[in-house]
Amino acid sequence: MKSMVMPVRTPDPSQTRASGVHALGFTGDDSALARALRRGHPGAPAALFDRYGRHVEGVLINLLGFDGEHEDLLHEIFAQALTCINKLQDDERLKAWLTSIAVHTARSCLRRRQRFRLFLRRAAQQDLPVSVADAETRRAVGRVYRLLERMPTELRLAFALRFIQGMELTEVAAACDVSLATIKRRLAKARRRFMLAARGDSALASWVVPDQEGQR
């Protein structure tokens, strides 16, 4: 399924890491990394951030928009992952597990914002990164997130993961901790709401793909 909204480019993770964080020589696949984290390998936490920091940050930005809070949330997610690593049941699904933590964190953040009113006020004053600095793109991105703020939280999360983050259906379902059938229903509702709201919006006319895919 083709994304309806142009994915947001993620800033260089070196801009968001805490200073002095470097990999300490750890090598290995995700299973080895998960085991190393459990054993307390000194280089494992930095290796985890190096490997998936940019991915998790991209998930947060695509779910929440460009927001001054996402750096704090990023570190909150990795702190939670390090604390709860023993709860990971399948070491090969380390990335998917981190994504799920990111989604739960974003959901909590959105609910704290009381239906996004605070988010909208902040977004109006927040400078976007250079990657979306041109006026046309800034306007389009702003309109997308203003449309998304009208959706219920669960619909917004599903929509953003699928059509902005570009995740597969099964990955979206896993990240949201629901069945494939449930995520398909949420996406269908979110898609209809978004296309209805975006219809005739001049800022989105050149960015939104016409809805010709039906309810697949």
Image: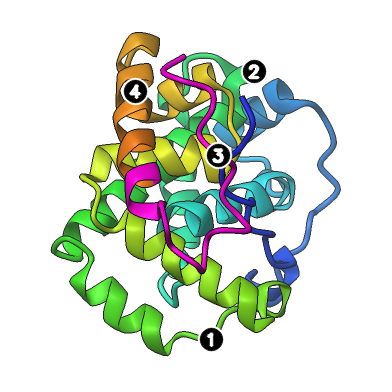
Tag 2: Cα neighbours inside 10 Å, few (<14), some, or many (≥20)? some
Q: Nearer the viewer, residue 14 or 169?
A: 169
Q: Amino acid at mark 2?
A: Glu
Estimate the x, y position of residue 64 in percent, counting from the top left.
41, 59
Tag 4: Cα neighbours inside 10 Å, few (<14), some, or many (≥20)? some
Which structural element holds mark 4? loop
Estimate the x, y position of residue 111 in percent, counting from the top left.
19, 55
Which circle's residue, 3 or 2, is located before the other in the chain? 2
Which structural element holds mark 1? loop
Q: Amino acid at mark 4?
A: Asp
Q: Amino acid at mark 3?
A: Pro
Q: Report which residue position mark 4 lands on.
A: 177
Mark 4–mark 3 Cα distance, whole angstroms, equals 29 Å
Q: Marks 3 and 1: which is nearer the front?
A: 3
**Residue 177 appears in the rendering:** yes
Q: Is there CB contact under 8 Å for labels 4 and 3?
A: no
Q: Which mark is residue 127?
A: 1
Q: Residue at x 37, y 28 (%)?
A: 187
Mark 1–mark 2 Cα distance, whole angstroms, equals 38 Å
Question: Is 203 left or right of 18, judged from the image as shown?
Answer: left
Is-magenta flag for residue 198?
yes
Mark 3–mark 1 Cα distance, whole angstroms, equals 29 Å
Q: Report which residue position mark 3 lands on.
A: 210
Magenta region: 195-216
Outermost residue toward the left?
Answer: 114
- Looking at the image, residue 183 lies above or below residue 149: above
Which structural element holds mark 3? loop
